[in-house]
Image: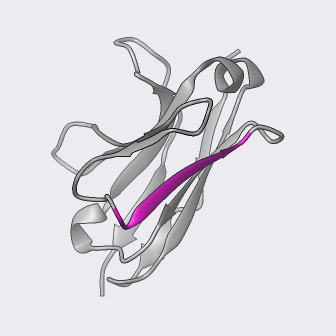
Amino acid sequence: QVQLVESGGGLVQPGGSLRLSCATSGSMFRNSAMGWYRQAPGDQREFVARITDDGLTMYRDSVNGRFAISRDASKNTVYLQMNRLKAEDTAVYYCNKWPVLMGDYWGQGTQVTVSA
């Protein structure tokens, strides 16, 4: 059974930091690159970052240098450290395998709000 449980979101001021966590099922974690995605109100869900099973990372341009994705195999968990947050980072953040396919299951996500 697929498990995707995101946590760690909240309200933060511009320039602040948050660390998101995603607990996954072991089978998905072991066999997949994992990614973070986000969806702002009125927008489509978009790719944020991904990490392969051997640690190679990739980021969308707007977060490169501010966000860092990591994974802990002992906990089947993926993290997203977000620094120097901006208002435009406000969205619901989701994790999933990468690449994600049409029809794949999504978790509930975690809300990140960047506002003064």
Residue 89 shown left or right of residue 44 in the figure = right
Residue 43 shown left or right of residue 33 in the figure = left
Nearer to us in this view, 69 or 91: 69
What residue sits 20% from the left and 37% below the top?
A: 44
Secondary structure mostly seen in the magenta stretch: strand
Which quarter shows the N terminus?
top right
Q: Residue furthest bottom?
A: 116
Residue 109: where, in percent of width, then height?
A: 49, 44
Residue 96: where, in percent of width, then height?
A: 50, 31
Does 53 appear above or below 93? Answer: above
Nearer to us in this view, 20 or 34: 34
Does 70 appear above or below 3? Answer: below
Residue 65: where, in percent of width, then height?
A: 35, 65
Residue 85: where, in percent of width, then height?
A: 35, 73
Q: Is residue 26 magenta?
A: no
What residue sits 37% from the left and 84% below the top?
A: 13
User: What is the count of numbered marks?
Assistant: 0
What residue sits 51% from the left and 70% below the top?
A: 18
Which quarter shows the C terminus?
bottom left
Nearer to us in this view, 12 or 52: 52
Model colouring: one colour
Q: Residue furthest right?
A: 74
- The stretch in magenta equals 65-72
The part of the image, by quadrant, that contains residue 101 is top left
The part of the image, by quadrant, that contains residue 29 is top right
What residue sits 58% from the left and 39% below the top?
A: 55
